[in-house]
Image: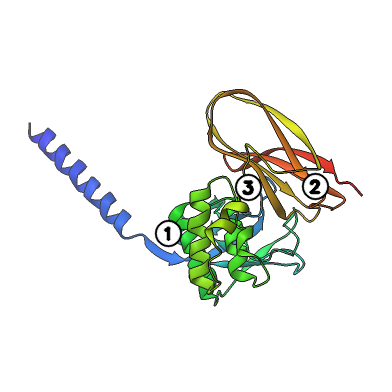
């Protein structure tokens, strides 16, 4: 009996020690940890995603002899080593616990802040700079709070950072969410709210598209479980130009989804149509434009 009591006390003390150790893990912002040389960070373009979902891969190596927490905050700004490519703003908070001498890979939600620069590609590296744009921080937080981590969120962010963007370009799969984003962008920027008539007239209706001269194609795919399915169209620079299909919970099974676009509006030499399942690009189809 005495042995079991002693054993129970030892187990209890060990558990208390473990809990205390967990509470004593020091937490640093990623930029603070870099400046203190606690970590080595490598940031590269994510070739399996697009510029408005998980655009970068952040590899963090812990150089210390103890476990640490690293915080990545909404609004952190990344710039590429080639200025012809897009800057990226982080649109989610992440906390990574990294063991001593170990590394961790993060693929955070983020969005491009430059609608006319090229999307990233393999071989492009990024580094952090200070984000002094309060409007950009505000829309990034709004996107995170409402989980607008998709094409419609990207369009809203572009309208905040680029005064030449038309607020009615904020478009997507849900008229209610679209209106919410248009109102928020109007509030942040001071751009006048369009009339409800104009908002209704410019809504992308996927089931009854108002198109006259179209070209397109079809994706056929099969999933054993329900997935978020998103089909979008990108210009030769890899920049989103239009969302073609969205279903938050596509049922399992074999599917055939047709897509089309008005070639009198989209006149580039070619477009890449990407099928994105649960935020990962799984199929890409090249469609030639009409010259």
Q: CA distance from mark 1 to mark 3?
A: 43 Å
N-term mark: 2 or 3: 3
Place of residue 25 in the rendered image (x, y in percent of width and height, measured from the top left): 36, 59
Towards the viewer: 199 or 98: 199
3 lies above or below 118: above
Horizontal placement of 286 versus 35: left or right?
Answer: right
- Identify residue for label 2: 271
Towards the viewer: 259 or 3: 259
- Identify residue for label 3: 204
Horizontal placement of 28 versus 50: left or right?
Answer: left
112 lies above or below 242: below
Which residue is located at x 50 percent, y 56 percent? 179
N-term mark: 1 or 3: 1
Place of residue 203 in the rendered image (x, y in percent of width and height, measured from the top left): 60, 50
Mark 1 burial class by Cα count in 10 Å: few <14, some 14-19, many 20+: some
Residue 63 visible at all: no
Towards the viewer: 171 or 100: 171
Place of residue 257 in the rendered image (x, y in percent of width and height, measured from the top left): 68, 31
Q: CA distance from mark 2 to mark 1?
A: 42 Å
């Amino acid at each position: 009996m005495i042995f079991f009591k002693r054993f129970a006390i030892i187990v209890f003390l060990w558990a208390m020690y473990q809990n205390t150790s967990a509470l004593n893990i020091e937490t640093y912002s990623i930029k603070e940890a870099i400046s203190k040389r606690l970590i080595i960070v490598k940031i590269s373009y994510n070739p399996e995603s697009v510029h408005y979902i998980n655009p970068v891969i952040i590899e963090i190596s812990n150089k210390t002899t103890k476990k640490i927490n690293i915080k990545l905050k909404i609004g952190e700004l990344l710039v590429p080593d080639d200025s012809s490519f897009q800057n990226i703003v982080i649109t989610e908070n992440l906390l990574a616990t990294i063991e001593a001498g170990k590394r961790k890979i993060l693929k955070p939600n983020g969005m491009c802040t430059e609608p006319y620069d090229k999307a990233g590609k393999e071989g492009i590296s990024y580094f952090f700079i200070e984000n002094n744009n309060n409007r950009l921080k505000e829309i990034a937080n709004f996107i995170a709070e409402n989980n607008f981590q998709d094409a419609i969120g990207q369009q809203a962010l572009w309208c905040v950072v680029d005064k030449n963007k038309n607020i009615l370009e904020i478009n997507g799969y849900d008229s209610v969410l679209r209106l919410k984003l248009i109102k928020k962008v109007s509030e942040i920027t001071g751009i006048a709210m369009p009339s409800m008539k104009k908002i209704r007239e410019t809504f992308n209706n996927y089931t009854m598209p108002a198109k006259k001269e179209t070209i397109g194609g079809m994706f056929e795919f099969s999933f054993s479980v329900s997935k978020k399915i998103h089909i979008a169209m990108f210009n030769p620079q890899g920049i989103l130009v239009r969302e073609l299909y969205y279903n938050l919970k596509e049922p399992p099974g074999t599917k055939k989804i047709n897509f089309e676009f008005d070639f009198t509006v989209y006149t580039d030499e070619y477009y890449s149509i990407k099928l994105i399942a649960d935020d990962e690009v799984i199929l890409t189809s090249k469609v030639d434009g009409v010259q």
